Amino acid sequence: MEALDAYMLSVKEKEYYDLIFLDIMMPKVDGVKVLKVIRDLESQNGIEDEKRAKIIMTTALGETQVIKTAMEYGCDAYASKPIDIEKFTQVLKDLGVTT
């Protein structure tokens, strides 16, 4: 939860993250639940869509329902492991995170 604490502090200080890579399966915490907490926090603090963190979920799982839920909670992209670097680079460009 240290990462979530750091994100909450960044929101409090209005120093928003540009990009978050969030694994669905993490020790002690479910990445999809963390995604929901982040999006709820952004909404509660009135963070405009263009200032919201771009969130890319990663996992080795291929469970369609988990991916669907993550998309409903507001993840911007999904990358399955092993990550294809060319596709991943294109996703970052599509999200406007890199040129």
Image: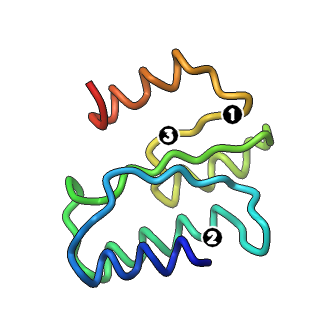
Q: Where is residue 83 in the image (x, y as percent from the top left)?
A: 65, 28
**In x, y percent, where is residue 78?**
57, 39
Which image quadrant for residue 96? top left
Residue at 45% in and 56% down: 74
Check disc 3 and give the amino acid type. Answer: Ala
Cα gap from disc 3 to disc 1, whole angstroms: 10 Å
Q: How far apart are marks 2 and 1 (CA)?
A: 18 Å
Q: Check disc 1 and report the residue beneath it.
A: 80
**Which residue is pictured at 51% across the width and 26% down the height?**
88
Check disc 2 and report its element: helix, strand or loop.
Answer: helix
Residue placed under numbered mark 2 in the picture: 33
Instruction: Report whether 17 appears left or right of 78.
Output: left
Looking at the image, residue 31 sits to the left or right of residue 94; the answer is: right
SS class of the residue under badge 3?
A: strand
Q: In this view, does 77 lie above or below 4?
A: above
Which is more N-terminal, label 1 or label 2? 2
Residue occupied by mark 3: 77
Q: What residue type is labelled 1?
A: Ser
- Quarter of image, res 34: bottom right
In the rendered view, does 95 fall on the left or right side of 68? left
